[in-house]
Image (cartoon, rainbow, N blue to C red):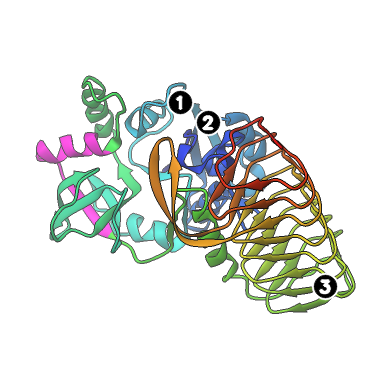
Amino acid sequence: MKAVILAAGEGVRCRPLTLTRSKVMLPVANKPTVEYVVQALHDSGIRDVVMVVGYAKERIMNYFGNGKDFDVNIEYAEQKQQLGTAYAIKQVKDLVEGEFLVLNGDNLVSEETITDLTEKHAGGVSILTAARSDATGYALVEERDGKVLKITEGMTLKGVCNVNTGIYIFGPDIFDAIDETLKSELGEFGITDSIQRMVDAGYGVHAYRTDRTWMDVIHSWNLLGVNARVLEDVHESVHETAEVDGKIKGRVVVGSGSIIGTGSYIKGPVIIGRDCEIGPNVVIAPSTSIGDNVTIEPFTYIRNSVILDNTYVGSGSTIKNSIIGENNLIESHFITESGKNLMIELEGVLHHADELGTVLGDGNRVGCNVSTAAGTLIGTECRIETGAVIRKQIPPHALVM
């Protein structure tokens, strides 16, 4: 059975991080989200993969190539228009034969998650569901004795807490249902509409529930919680060929060529990439990921944060519950205020964040003594002058004085 990974979307709700990369390439514990999907497929015995790419496709294709480095075979189909998941799946019609598995590239899954569906599948269409107390933003699946009665998005169904994980097994008949869906005037064509057409036509559509790993990054700040949970799976410290002079406690992974300075203290779970320079006298607290070629100057404190590759953080900084993009130059005494139960505006709509400091996009230049209010989103390639206090969202290419 082939697997189809949907990886074409931009992920507007994950801006500013997705201004320069697709959502599936957001890093969790220093690996793109979609790499966990590829690994889970490999471990479950599925080696033939089709990736549907679109937005920022070159970054995905350059990273995975033909899949040889990941011990899988990868083909690509391009979704040139962002017209929904039904349209995306239509692009693989000539690349699959018989039954095939479909997954989203921006959901973290495990081998067991996949086999919860593949081992129970008995023909027709199969949908993997998960129980969620808060089903906001998810499609709901109403079923009786495993047979799907209704699948719907943007609604609340009384007594239904089964959410659609976006993991399916389809046969060739799905393409006929997709063609019918594409004739409608929906504007964006979700695969759930095609599945509901099959349900209404009496086709065998079944749901199977999983309680295995299934984590979704809806907003950029969800990356923090997912990152923390993945880091919890780090079972032992690995220091490769790093030079470690500071104190390390707990499960800490340090990549080759990295230096941990004298007087620094790192408490895991933490992952630090290759060729980094940390310290001296830096404190890195749990649930933190630091990418490759990152410099953290002395007397800086970092907790529950994600810092991407090629970033410089000046001395005396405090970064909590924040995500710092690639290629940022941050001078000394950068302070991110953190807050809980925040309402953050995206595209004119308010979204809830349990806890957040700052999300800083790629390629910014931040002067000394800059501070940011809780929930601040800063775009890409901005210049923020010394002493600025950021209390609102900053668009890309802005000059803040």
Residue holding disc 3 = 264
Instruction: Describe the element under mark 3 as helix, strand or loop.
Output: loop
Tag 2: Cα neighbours inside 10 Å, few (<14), some, or many (≥20)?
A: many
Which label belongs to residue 198? none
- The residue lying toward the viewer, choosing from 31 and 2, is 31
**Distance from the alpha carbon under mark 2 to that under mark 3:** 45 Å
Question: Where 155 falls versus 342 (above or below)?
Answer: above
**Amino acid bearing label 3:** Ser
Question: Where 381 falls versus 118 (above or below)?
Answer: above
Q: Can I make out residue 6 in this image?
A: no
**Amino acid bearing label 1:** Gln
Residue holding disc 2 = 76
Sequence order check, earlier mark of 3 and 1 = 1
Instruction: Describe the element under mark 1 as helix, strand or loop.
Output: loop
Q: Quadrant of residue 247?
A: bottom right
Instruction: Describe the element under mark 2 as helix, strand or loop.
Output: strand
Q: Which quadrant is home to the C terminus? A: top right
